[in-house]
């Protein structure tokens, strides 16, 4: 575990494409967010979960898997990535690894691997061969993230802070690690992936 890395799980979105609160979707009999928490516990003893309402917080607190987490209700009711930026005052670690609640196969070593690549950069983000970035599987300096609240997209945040981009191939992470669940069809694919890769 790395004392200065906070793992922050974003769980405040509308989940409009799946028709229900995404963190509660079941994958192999477990709520989807339990995979994110399991991933986070490889790096930190107390992950953070950021939600956009007290109702979402109450829903998650009823789950057995959230016992070691700190649930933060975004004071501005933001949704998606920007809830993390708005809630940084509650987080004190120097580095923040941001993830969504919908990537159940992330490589547990990823935060440490990215930390090794960070150097003096303000953040480091995995990059696909076509230039597509994975900002919700990336490591950031907390101080820098707190200065970009006016940004309109995560791409803009990465440009503003001058995040370092490292190819997924160079990171040594299998591409399937970044599979995320946006639809019920994706959930079915994830069930198949579990049979291939198993649980991390």
Image (cartoon, rainbow, N blue to C red):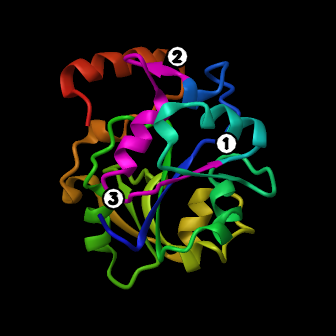
- The circle on residue 91 is none
Quadrant in the rendering for residue 155: bottom right
- The circle on residue 184 is 2
Compare residues 67 and 133 and report the one nearer the observer: 67
- The circle on residue 43 is 3
Look at the numbered disc 2 and give the secondary structure of its residue: helix
Q: Quadrant of the N terminus?
A: bottom left
Look at the numbered disc 3 and give the secondary structure of its residue: loop
Circles 2 and 1: CB distance less than 8 Å?
no
In the rendered structure, the answer to whether residue 193 lies left or right of residue 161 reads left
- The circle on residue 12 is 1
- In the displayed structure, 64 sits above or below 138; it is above
Residue 61 position, x and y percent, is 61, 37
In the rendered structure, the answer to whether residue 164 lies left or right of residue 58 reads left
Lower sequence index among marks 2 and 1: 1
In the rendered structure, the answer to whether residue 91 lies left or right of residue 152 reads left
Residue farthest toward the bottom in the current orientation of the protein: 120
- In the displayed structure, 139 sits above or below 60; it is below
Residue 50 position, x and y percent, is 63, 50
How far is the residue under mark 2 from the one under mark 1?
18 Å
Residue occupying image coordinates x 19% and y 22% = 196
- In the displayed structure, 48 sits above or below 194; it is below
Look at the numbered disc 1 and give the secondary structure of its residue: loop
How far is the residue under mark 1 from the one under mark 3?
22 Å
Q: Rate crowding at label 2 as few (under 14), some (14 to 19) or many (20 or more) other CA atoms within 10 Å.
A: few
Q: Rate crowding at label 3 as few (under 14), some (14 to 19) or many (20 or more) other CA atoms within 10 Å.
A: many
Residue occupying image coordinates x 64% and y 74% = 146
Compare residues 60 and 196 and report the one nearer the observer: 60
Q: Nearer the viewer, mark 2 or mark 3?
A: 3
Q: Which region is colored magenta? A: 25-50
């Amino acid at each position: 575990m790395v004392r200065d890395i906070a793992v922050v799980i974003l769980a405040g979105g509308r989940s409009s494409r799946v028709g229900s609160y995404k963190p509660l979707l079941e994958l192999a009999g477990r709520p989807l967010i339990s995979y994110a928490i399991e991933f986070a516990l490889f790096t930190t003893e107390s992950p953070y979960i950021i939600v956009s309402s007290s109702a979402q917080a109450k829903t998650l607190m009823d789950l057995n898997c959230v016992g070691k987490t700190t649930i933060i209700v975004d004071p501005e009711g933001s949704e998606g990535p920007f809830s993390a930026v708005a809630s940084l005052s509650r987080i004190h670690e120097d580095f923040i690894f941001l993830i969504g609640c919908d990537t159940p196969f992330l490589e547990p070593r990823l935060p440490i691997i990215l930390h090794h690549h960070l150097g003096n950069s303000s953040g480091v983000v995995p990059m696909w061969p076509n230039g597509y970035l994975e900002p919700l599987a990336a490591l950031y300096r907390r101080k820098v993230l707190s200065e970009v609240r006016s940004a309109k997209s995560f791409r803009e945040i990465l440009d503003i802070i001058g995040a370092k981009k490292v190819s997924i191939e160079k990171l040594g992470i299998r591409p399937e690690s970044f599979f995320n669940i946006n639809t019920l069809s994706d959930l079915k694919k994830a069930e198949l992936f579990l049979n291939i890769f198993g649980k991390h």
